[in-house]
Amino acid sequence: SPKEIEKTLDDELGMSEAPAAALVRSPVIILDDIHVASPAAQEVLCRKLDQFIPAGKPLGLDTSKAKFIFTTPPGLDAVVASGAFSASLYSQISAFEIVCPPLRDRLSVPSDRDEVLKYAIKAISEALDLHPPTVLTPPDVEHIQKQQWPGNFRDLNNFLIRLLLERARKH
């Protein structure tokens, strides 16, 4: 809700304190799926960003010690053009854009696929205390490549956890 957003920003950024005290904390604030924020929540964000970021300074520069990361699917500019997202908020948050391809695209590139899977298998094996780490078979990799992975890495991670645990039980 807009009140929760305002309270969280006040608490995390120290916006209710003197500006100098707020700058000492240096938090990273990640606002996921900002495109679904209600108009009231967008208004709160605009106001709070105006309050925290010095006037005339772009959000991405080191003018404030806080770092903001806003996530949204591609095409937010079209949502702004339709009037469903605040043009003012969009201008505040769109100074620097990082485009991340969908996981299914990354997994279609062998070098990317191998690095992503190697990293995930190692991390999961360590977290679950599975030694030695499981090695994926060619049919495993083929199955992984055929999936759409709508939840991106979360879905792949969950699939790999299940696979590794099943393999560990069999041994």
Image (cartoon, grey):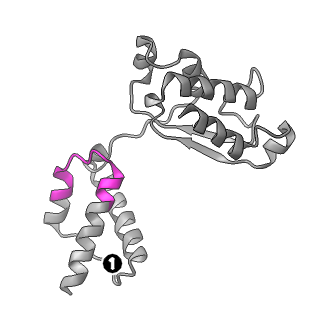
Instruction: Please give the range of residues in magenta.
Output: 143-157
Residue 58 in view: no
The reply to whether residue 134 is in sight is: yes
Which residue sits at x=27%, y=44%?
150
Q: Residue drawn at (75%, 20%), measured in percent from left and top? A: 56
Horizontal relation, residue 92 to residue 23: left or right: left
**Could you tell me what secondary structure mostly forms the magenta stretch?**
helix
Q: Looking at the image, which residue sits at the far bottom?
A: 171
On whether residue 151 falls in the magenta region, the answer is: yes
Which x, y percent locates residue 144? 21, 57
Residue 63 occupies quadrant: top right
Residue 32 position (above or below residue 90): below
Task: Return the residue nearer the eye: 48 or 119.
Answer: 48
99 inside magenta stretch: no
Q: Does residue 110 appear to the left or right of 85 in the view shown?
A: left
Quadrant position of residue 66: top right
Quadrant of the snapshot with the C terminus: bottom left
Amino acid type at image mark 1: Pro
Residue 160: x and y in percent read 28, 65
The picture places residue 119, in percent across and down from the top left corner, at: 39, 64
Query: Which of the 4 image quadrants contains residue 159?
Result: bottom left
Question: Label 1 belongs to which residue?
Answer: 133
Q: Is residue 91 above or below residue 146?
A: above
Residue at screen point 59% across, 22% down: 43
- Up the image or down, 97 lies above or below 106; here it is above
As drawn, the residue found furthest toward the left would be 139
Disc 1 crowd rating (10 Å Cα; few below 14, some 14-19, many 20+) is some
Q: Secondary structure at mark 1?
A: loop
